[in-house]
């Protein structure tokens, strides 16, 4: 898999989680799983019921709950991100 660019993940900041395309969801998931290596922090600003979310048994269940609540994507690009992304080879 090609590593998504920093611009691709930056473009998702502030977007409604449920409205992401499959391609955008793949970019988001890549950086959710491996973002720390690239100094990229990904979070979903939870607008859903915290109790319902706490009862989720998997990330997929939690994602479904947050999508129903129109939660937003929050991306933070750290100061070392450019260096880490350029050193990916």
Image (cartoon, rainbow, N blue to C red):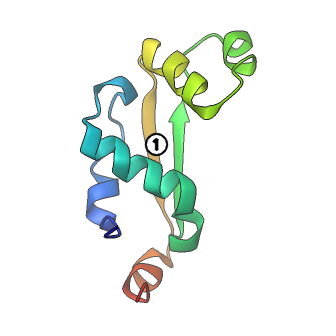
Are there few (<14), some (14-19), or many (20+) residues within 10 Å of tag 1?
some
Q: Quadrant of residue 60?
A: top right
Q: Which residue is mark 1?
A: 74
- Tell me residue 76's x, y (percent): 48, 55
Picture coordinates of residue 57, whole percent (x, y): 71, 24
Q: Quadrant of residue 9?
A: bottom left
Of helix, strand and loop, which one carries label 1? strand
Quarter of the figure with residue 73: top left
Q: Quadrant of the N terminus?
A: bottom left
71 above or below 26? above
Expressed as whole percent of the image width and height from the top left, the position of residue 5 reads 30, 67
Residue 53 in the image: above or below residue 40: above
Looking at the rendered structure, the number of numbered marks drawn on it comes to 1
Q: Residue at x 51, y 49 (%)?
A: 42
**Lateral position of residue 49 relative to residue 16, left or right:** right
Quadrant of the drawing holding the C terminus: bottom left
Which residue is more in the foreground, 28 or 79?
A: 28
Name the residue located 41 percent from the left edge and 18 percent from the top edge. Answer: 70
Q: Nearer the viewer, residue 10 or 22?
A: 22
Q: Who is closer to the viewer here, 35 or 45?
A: 35
- Above or below: residue 89 compared with residue 12: below
Q: Residue at x 69, y 20 (%)?
A: 56
Q: Residue at x 35, y 41 (%)?
A: 25
């Amino acid at each position: 898999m090609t590593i998504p660019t920093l611009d691709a993940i930056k473009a998702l900041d502030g977007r409604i989680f449920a409205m992401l395309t499959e391609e955008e969801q793949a970019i988001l998931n890549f950086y959710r799983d491996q973002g720390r290596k690239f100094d990229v922090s990904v979070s979903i600003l939870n607008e859903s019921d915290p109790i319902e979310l706490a009862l989720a048994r998997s990330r997929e269940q939690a994602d479904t709950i947050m999508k129903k609540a129109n939660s937003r994507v929050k991306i933070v690009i750290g100061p070392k991100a450019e260096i880490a992304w350029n050193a990916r080879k």
